[in-house]
Image: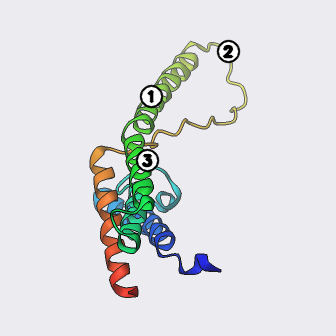
Amino acid sequence: MEFLTNFPLWAALFAIGFAQFIKVPLQYLATRRFDWTLITSTGGMPSSHSGAVTALSTAIALQEGLGSPFFAISAIFGIIVMFDATGVRRHAGEQATVLNRLVDDFNKLVEEMKTWPEKEEQEKRKELKELLGHQPIEVFFGGLLGIILTLVLHGIIF
């Protein structure tokens, strides 16, 4: 039952939950519509991945100190996660956007070329996930969110 008092674990989980939830009102401010699917989606502002790894590192630093090997592990882990979010995952999302456009264009071409009566409507395809990674600003604010939330939680709990 020690995990129930594991502050770094709970700080990181809280940062994930808060970052995912706050995406909904932030998107509403930008588009004037609520999109509740953002709570379980990847990508977007702020990065919950960045929030989680910075919350974890901040909590470990508060409990174990900056000289702790645990802090070193979490900091390097965090750097890798945040680099990946702005690099590989972001580019995969950009490629998905291009592929989705190509599929749409191809489908339009096929429809225009049809000269025979239309058949029954085929099952709709699932589009590739385009919102995979993050813009650098989303990662920055996700990281900042993780640090601030952890400092606030630490102040409240300890």
Q: CA distance from mark 1 to mark 3?
A: 20 Å
| Disc nearest the viewer among 1 and 3 | 3
Place of residue 141 in the rendered image (x, y in percent of width and height, measured from the top left): 29, 57
Residue in the picture at 41% in, 52% down: 78
**Label 1: which secondary element:** helix
- 149 or 79, nearer to the observer: 79
Residue in the picture at 50% in, 73% down: 10
Q: Earlier in the sequence, mark 2 or mark 1?
A: 1
**Residue type at tag 1:** Gln
Disc on res. 95: 1
Q: Is residue 48 visible?
A: no
Q: CA distance from mark 3 to mark 2?
A: 52 Å
**Label 2: which secondary element:** loop
**Label 3: which secondary element:** helix
Q: Earlier in the sequence, mark 3 or mark 2?
A: 3
Residue in the picture at 36% in, 65% down: 146
Disc on res. 81: 3
Q: Quadrant of residue 156?
A: bottom left
Say if 142 sits above or below 7 in the image: above
- 60 or 127, nearer to the observer: 60
Say if 69 sits above or below 87 in the image: below
To which residue does mark 2 refer? Answer: 116
Say if 101 sits above or below 32 in the image: above
**Cβ–Cβ under 8 Å for marks 1 and 3:** no
At label 3, counting other C-alpha atoms closer than 10 Å, the crowd grade (few under 14, some 14-19, many 20 or more) is some
Q: How is the image coloured?
A: rainbow
| Disc nearest the viewer among 2 and 1 | 1
Disc on res. 58: none
Place of residue 108 in the rendered image (x, y in percent of width and height, measured from the top left): 52, 22
Q: Residue furthest right?
A: 120
**Residue type at tag 2:** Trp
